Image (spheres, coloured by chain):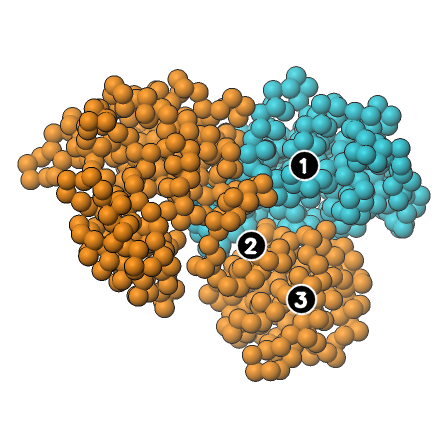
Amino acid sequence: MKIHEYQARDLLRSYSIPVPGGRAIASIEEAEGAFKDATAGMASPEAVVKAQVFAGGRGKAGFVKLVKTPGDAREAARFMFTNRMKSPQTPPEGLEVKKLLVATAAEIADRKEDSPRSGEAPKKEEFYLAITTDRKSRRNVLIASREGGVEIEEVAKRDPDAIVKVPIHPLIGLQAYQAREVAFKLGFKARQVDQAVEIMRNLARLYLEKDCSLAEINPLVLTPPSSTHPDGQVIALDAKFNFDDNALFRHKELTDLADHSEENPAEIRAAKFGLTYIALDGNIGCLVNGAGLAMATMDIIKHHGGEPANFLDVGGSATEEAVTEAFSIILADASVKGVLVNIFGGIMRCDVIAQGIINAATKHKNADGSIGFKVPLVVRLEGTNVEAGRQLLNEAKAKIPTMQAATDLTDAAKKVCAAVG
Amino acid sequence: MSVLVNAKTRVICQGITGSFGAQHTKGCYHYGTRVVGGVTPGKGGTKDANGLPVFDTVERAVRETGADATMIFVPPRLAADAILEAAAAGIPVICAITEGVPVQDMIKVRAVLDGMEKRPTLIGPNCPGIITPGPKTGGGTSGSDPYTNAGCKIGIMPGYIHTHVSQAKLGKSVGIVSRSGTLTYEAVWQTSRLGLGQSTCIGIGGDPVRGLSHIDCIELFNMDPDTHGILMIGEIGGTDEIDAAHYVRQHVKKPVAAFIAGRTAPPGRRMGHAGAIIGGADDTADAKIRALQAAGVEVALSPADMGVAMVKAMRLG
């Protein structure tokens, strides 16, 4: 699960990690007030207005704007609320923006030791800080770099030594000495060190307590010296969190933040029934049990020249109702020209799948009002209760005229590829 | 012979009175597994549907039954505790079937298990389990008329697809290790239909932090004199299969075949930025396939050819 930037800022704040002032707004009318609050006391007021959507490409689409007056803030808000955001990462029709973040445009200190070449702007004090889980060492790992504000993958490719990685002990957590070492390696000095250490330890605590799979601050910046912070202040300008879906049962406070509006409606519908559905570009609808077999089924369809329309894993514990729903989701996709059912029953029983097929054939209503499978259906069943499953289908044959049985994986893939042409 | 479990293994089920626990305890019992009881806190002193004794704690179950393996079917939020309880009770083989265990729970569990003087073998979580097939009897309707004579099935896999070497046409046994449940069944079924038996099949599960890895299982199969070939089924993500390829190249003389699922999967659905650094370029299917081929492994490019690749690697076909 992911959360929006304004929610991420609230989360950081609740763990005493400083972020620039600002708040989320839901209407054009709130823009001026939010600008005034975000820039209160600034000699030259400046704020940034950002659309709160998950899709990338906001800047290029004009949905991130630097503004200097309340009127500009209102104009930016009007633009973002009344236009749909379109980028390569959004659906072609674009996304409706429901919330904006209006935040103080924080000033970033110049990086002193880097002598800029003439004509080039000086480098800024921007850092990268993240925690993620490393499956190889089976530990959470703190990752930091002096090169912040850019894609960390780029840094990793160009200059792997510019990235510091520190393993976090599973039982005692990130220790102060480890955080200090990282702070010094990042080049922090004097009172900045304690600030950075505090941020790292709080981020590590947040990571564990909220069951994150990624907690990323990019960039973490140093502000110029001020009266309250004579050595400058270390603050988080932007953050990104991913949470472990397996742990959401103990985090109602996180599930309450979920925004499903940018997800594929079919994926949401599937999730409600405990199904995993991923839409793809092809025309062969697939219904499979188990992620590995589902991937292998996609592989073999492509191997025989077909293109899967989706990845649908009914998992192990799906009920007859969920299986029926799974067929409805597949059949509701207009691009589906054939359906392949590939089940190797373990926990999942073949008779449950067979009953789901029969239910879909007798009850599913198509867009044109007709009932059942209008497209070819190829069924391959093996495993737990396979005999009962085959018998059910045999008895219901007349109700499912487009159905063909397949004997094995290759046979199934060949038949469905031939059926869609 | 076999690895980790055999006909003598005494098995309990943690979560034996839950719906899945009960259903699969019955399945294992009918298969011929020596199931000796189960654990459900608060239901100690009762019996399950098969007449097996139920205990309140794993410690008690071990003391009364001499159990030396457990299969865990408790809900995800209780899984870490169940694994630690089994480890504390001294059970050497712990098989966690439960799907959906929080990753942070597993990080702590692994840290505790790895620090134990007598470290138990953990299989899973989120796995189908482990099976050492026995010769089929033609029965399978009840515990007194078991499916096999002297088999040991610990988990949710369908028993009938497996073959004991004594009933295998080619007279050879292979060890199978896989991250995926149903894809393992597919591989087992293909090898059985081609006339191979299986010494032991291990589903290690697909979670990022888990017990046995591919290498651990390959090492076990490599040492087992009655495992004549090794079939490994991997998928995209992580570097387990690459590590296994290096291990095979250096240590394994037995024929090895493999399949990697997800060659055509859309990339980057789950990886965050920092995760991508750690994952590196090694976690694509093609990188894994290349590493395995370089190690002399016979790689099936279609999932329909897993069994064929194994037979080919063993020079039987």
- Under circle 1, the secondary element is helix
Q: Position of residue A22 (x, y in %)?
A: 30, 44
Q: Residue at x 72, y 37 (%)?
A: B72
Cβ–Cβ below 8 Å for labels 1 and 3? no
Q: Position of residue B11 (x, y in %)?
A: 80, 34
Sequence-wise, the earlier of marks 3 and 2 is 2
* Chain at tag 3: A
Q: Residue at x 40, y 49 (%)?
A: A4
Q: Position of residue B269 (x, y in %)?
A: 46, 51
| Label 3 packing within 10 angstroms: few (<14), some (14-19), many (20+) | many
Q: Chain B's colour?
A: cyan
- Under circle 2, the secondary element is helix
For the residues carrying marks 3 and 2, which lies nearer the camera in this image? 3
Task: Locate residue A134 relative to residue B172 in the image: left or right.
Answer: left
Separation of residues labelled 1 and 2 (CA atoms): 30 Å
Q: Residue at x 53, y 71 (%)?
A: A333
Cβ–Cβ below 8 Å for labels 1 and 2? no
- Judge whether B103 appears above or below B89 on screen: below
Mark on residue A295?
Answer: 2
- Judge whether B258 appears above or below A409 on screen: above
Residue at image mark 1: B78
